[in-house]
């Protein structure tokens, strides 16, 4: 258990670099579009190196062919799951400290079951109710910010992260549905959750939408890095559109290097460590422990911003919000894996 927790905490440390470095780029005047777009340009290069180094070039080429066959699907999934998600996270860094963004981002634990319900999947309502503790914590954190910043800045710092919290699981669920061939689900096959049954009209709409998702049993769909590659490729059109719309001035050398660090720390190191921690788990309780370690992102983001950027530590309401957020995450994951 110690190895699982230690590995998970180390992953959370690397994940937290995203929030701190994004805030640093914002304070230095870097445009949020470049902060977001350059990360995925670097990710493409890093993925290419990884596939070559691991001898999986043929698998990567298979993923590219799969992208070409279903480019509309991957553009939608990648633009939402990677593009909209990270564009909103980067935008919010212009208005809120990194630790506030990290804490608000934990709302994805509430967004995920909502997205699952939208796809007609089973969700534990007991676990869903526990996410209200996380929501209360996020409200406390942003309420403290509202006391020291204009309301519009608080909203611009918080609302985009809430949107990102829904976009990320939605894009990933699209990929899961494609891999599981969920478009073929019919009444009597994959049932709508018994704990929260959708109306028949809504159920029928769900089935029609899921049938439009292409079934993909390609070997590339069984490899996590290939799925990251496919989503990254799918996000590229959105980055091109955003650069064209906002026409930001060219990024500085510092911003280019910081986006590389985000890609390495979060996209490679953190992801690998977190997947390793989950792979070591041999029971639901150990799996829950691995997932719970990611709540440390809030703590590490707070410490990193205070040490590296001279950020101000939260007051009583902010600390209360952090405590509620961490408590809600732990209880939620404990119930989910019970």
Image: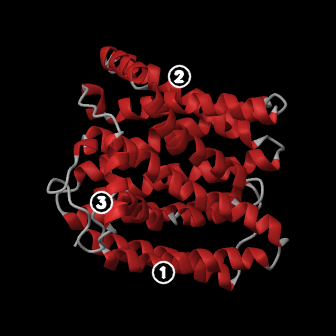
Nearer-the-camera pick, 170 or 280: 170
Q: Nearer the viewer, mark 3 or mark 2?
A: 3
x 71%, y 81%: residue:
315
In percent of width and height, residue 15 lies at: 52, 50
Give the crowd class for mark 3: few <14, some 14-19, many >=20 residues within 10 Å.
some
Nearer-the-camera pick, 253 or 164: 164
- For the residues labelled 3 and 2, the Cα–Cα distance comes to 35 Å
Quadrant in which residue 33 is drawn: top right
Note whether 77 is above or below 64 in the view shown: below
Disc assigned to residue 121: 3
The residue tagged 2 is 45
Quarter of the image where the C terminus is located: bottom left
Secondary structure of the residue carrying tag 2 is helix
In percent of width and height, residue 143 lies at: 70, 79
Residue furthest front as drawn: 201
Quadrant in which residue 57 is drawn: top left
Disc assigned to residue 204: none
Q: Earlier in the sequence, mark 2 or mark 1?
A: 2
Answer whether residue 1 is visible to the viewer in this image.
Answer: no
Disc assigned to residue 133: 1
Q: Nearer the viewer, mark 2 or mark 1?
A: 1
Secondary structure of the residue carrying tag 1 is helix
Q: Earlier in the sequence, mark 3 or mark 2?
A: 2
């Amino acid at each position: 258990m110690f190895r699982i927790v230690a590995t998970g905490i180390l992953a959370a440390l690397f994940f937290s670099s995203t929030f701190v470095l994004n805030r640093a780029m914002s304070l230095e005047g870097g445009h949020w579009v470049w902060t977001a777009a350059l990360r995925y340009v670097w990710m493409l290069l890093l993925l290419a190196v990884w596939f070559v180094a691991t001898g999986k070039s043929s698998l990567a080429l298979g993923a590219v062919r799969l992208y070409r066959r279903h480019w509309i699907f991957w553009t939608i999934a990648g633009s939402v799951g990677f593009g909209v998600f990270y564009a909103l996270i980067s935008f919010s860094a212009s208005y809120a400290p990194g630790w506030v963004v990290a804490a608000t981002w934990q709302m994805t634990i509430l967004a995920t079951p909502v997205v699952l319900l939208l796809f007609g999947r089973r969700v534990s309502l007991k676990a869903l109710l526990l996410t209200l503790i996380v929501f209360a914590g996020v409200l406390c954190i942003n309420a403290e910010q509202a006391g020291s910043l204009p309301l519009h800045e608080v909203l611009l710092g918080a609302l985009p992260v809430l949107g990102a919290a829904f976009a990320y699981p939605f894009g990933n669920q699209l990929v899961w549905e494609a891999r599981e061939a969920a478009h073929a689900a019919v009444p009597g096959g994959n049932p709508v959750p018994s704990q929260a049954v959708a109306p028949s009209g809504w159920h029928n709409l769900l089935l029609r939408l899921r049938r439009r998702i292409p079934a993909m049993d390609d070997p590339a769909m069984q490899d996590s890095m290939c799925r990251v590659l496919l989503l990254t490729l799918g996000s590229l059109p959105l980055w091109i559109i955003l650069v064209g719309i906002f026409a930001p001035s060219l990024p500085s050398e510092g911003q280019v290097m910081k986006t590389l660090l985000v890609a390495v720390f979060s996209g490679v190191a953190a992801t690998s460590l977190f997947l390793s921690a989950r792979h070591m788990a041999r029971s639901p309780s150990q799996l829950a422990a691995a997932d719970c370690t990611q709540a440390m992102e809030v703590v590490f983001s707070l410490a990193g911003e205070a040490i590296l950027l001279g950020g101000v530590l939260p007051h009583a309401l902010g600390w209360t919000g952090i405590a509620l957020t961490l408590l809600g995450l732990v209880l939620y994951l404990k119930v989910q894996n019970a």
